[in-house]
Amino acid sequence: MKRILAIFAIFAALTSGAQNIITSDNISVEINGETTREALNTLLGELSAQGINFTYSPQFDNTRKLVAISYRIALSNGTILGEVKQVGLVAPGSKTKFTLAKQDGVFKVTCLDKCN
């Protein structure tokens, strides 16, 4: 059942144009200028379901395009996994990304901000 849900999540991410994959063992999130306020809110809920607190402060322009974001990721017990301050997303191809992998039952950061 987990495999079916993971495949469905990947399919949904690919067909919607999103760059995010969130499973019980791995999390890969990409935020860029095309990320909407609604997508950030959805991301907040999906990460919370995995025990990850995601707090963010976005800046949108008058066309509702995300131009900058600051964010923090933490475990539900308050342990801060990482923090990124004021990433500019105006230039074409600009993005911020974080990846987490579960090790010994706990999520650890494998990449923060400038990931390949």
Image (spheres, grey):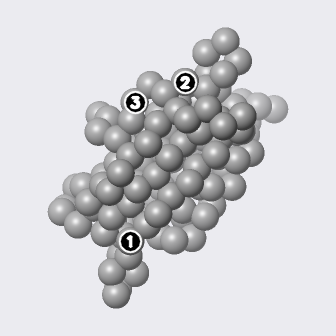
Q: Which residue is mark 3?
A: 111
Q: Is residue 82 left or right of residue 93?
A: right
Closest to the camera, between mark 3 and mark 1, is 1
Q: Is residue 106 left or right of residue 27?
A: right
Q: Quadrant of residue 70?
A: bottom left
* Amino acid type of the residue that numbered disc 2 sits on in the rendered structure: Lys
Residue 39 on image: x %, y %: 54, 64
- Could you give the CA–CA distance between mark 1 and mark 2, rounded to whole angstroms? 27 Å
* Amino acid type of the residue that numbered disc 1 sits on in the rendered structure: Gln
- Could you give the CA–CA distance between mark 2 and mark 3, rounded to whole angstroms? 9 Å
Graded by Cα atoms within 10 Å as few (under 14), some (14 to 19) or many (20 or more), the crowding at tag 3 reads some
Q: Residue at x 63, y 61 (%)?
A: 42
- Could you give the CA–CA distance between mark 3 and mark 1, rounded to whole angstroms? 23 Å
Q: Residue at x 39, y 35 (%)?
A: 112
Graded by Cα atoms within 10 Å as few (under 14), some (14 to 19) or many (20 or more), the crowding at tag 1 reads some
Q: Quadrant of the N terminus?
A: top right
Residue 113 on image: x %, y %: 34, 41
Q: Which residue is mark 1?
A: 59
Q: Between residues 95 and 19, which one lies in front from this camera angle? A: 95
Q: Residue at x 54, y 42 (%)?
A: 73
Residue 99 on image: x %, y %: 47, 34
Q: Secondary structure at mark 3?
A: strand
Q: Secondary structure at mark 2?
A: strand
Residue 20 vs 74, above or below: the answer is below
Q: Quadrant of residue 24?
A: top right
The disc at residue 108 is 2
Residue 7 shows in the view: no
